[in-house]
Image (tube, rainbow, N blue to C red):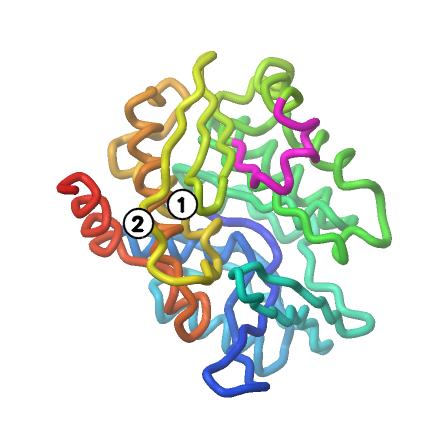
Amino acid sequence: MDLLCIGEMVIDFLPGSEPGSYVRNAGGAPANVAIAATRSGLSAAFLGMMGNDDFGRFLVATLEENGVDVVLKRLTDEAVTTMTFVTLGKDGERSFTFVRKPGADMLLTPADIRPEVVAAASIVHIGSCSLSRSPSAEATIEALRLARGSGKLVSFDVNYRAPLWQRESDATEKIAEALPFVDLLKVSEEEVHLVGGTTGLAGCLKTHGITVAIETLGARGARCHFAGQTIDVPAPPAVAIDATGAGDAFWGAFLAHLVTVGVRRVSDLSLDALRDAATYGAAAGSLCVRRKGAIAALPTRAEILTLINKEVAR
């Protein structure tokens, strides 16, 4: 496979077309990255855990309908849904309310990480929410170790959601434990403090041997740190007020472009490849608008190319 995404899956509820109605959104960074990459023409697999309820079944079906091979379906007796209620303000800002069903545990265990699955991938992507609980954290670190040890390109998304970290250790400690195994680090503008701020981000590259760090900047595009240089990539004008799943669409398109141009190892990375990949990512994020849930919002490679070509022509 081209891309393997590892981590738990959450379920969001987005505002529907009628007042008081919500639309199911197949959320979770690993799942959305896998789908975004698939829509860009890659073969992808999702390794994760979800609940044995209607929403869990919905998510599995949606992933498979979009060409994502769900290589592990751990269906428990508990309904393990994490629900996110999203409210849009007049300025397009979103506020979140998390509801987690009691006794829910949809996180990975060390036994869930199959070395042969990791070995089959060209790029391995992991979301940091899986670090929020033990033994999920152990499984996540083991997957990173396996991937790095076998020469895979390892992508890591600093994806912080406060409710997931309430019972155990501080996020910064767990993320720091994972960083030595990471080649490509993604961090949003809101989450950069988890790696020590802008100054700390530069230090991460040197201290942990991280090759590339990407800051996603929402409507302002992205900033790429590589080989002592900083590349600013502006985002094309957004086509709607709400960018549901924009960060995951960005990273899915970013990784898809790297695979498309033959990047399989750290030694394959170049300034031009990263700039182009970030351009694809920024376009994908701009296209990721509120339609009927995040799956419908994730753009295709053709849509991304169309938007980029329009900007070039302009």
Instruction: For mark 2, give the secondary structure.
Output: loop
The magenta-colored residue range is 185-198
Label drawn at residue 286: none
Label drawn at residue 42: 2
Instruction: Estimate how packed mark 2 is, as few (under 14), some (14 to 19) or many (20 or more) residues with alpha carbons within 10 Å.
Output: many
Looking at the rendered structure, the number of numbered marks drawn on it comes to 2
Q: Mark 2 vs mark 1: which is more N-terminal?
A: 1
Q: In which quarter of the image is residue 104?
A: bottom right
Indicate the quadrant containing the C terminus: top left, top right, bottom left or bottom right.
top left
User: At 36% across and 22% down in the image, what residue appears?
Assistant: 269
Q: Does the CB distance between marks 2 and 1 fall below 8 Å? A: yes
* Alpha carbons under labels 2 and 1: distance apart: 7 Å
Give the amino acid type for the residue marked by disc 1 in the picture.
Answer: Leu
Give the amino acid type for the residue marked by disc 2 in the picture.
Answer: Leu
Q: Quickly name the residue at label 1.
A: 3
Say above or below: 101 vs 128.
below
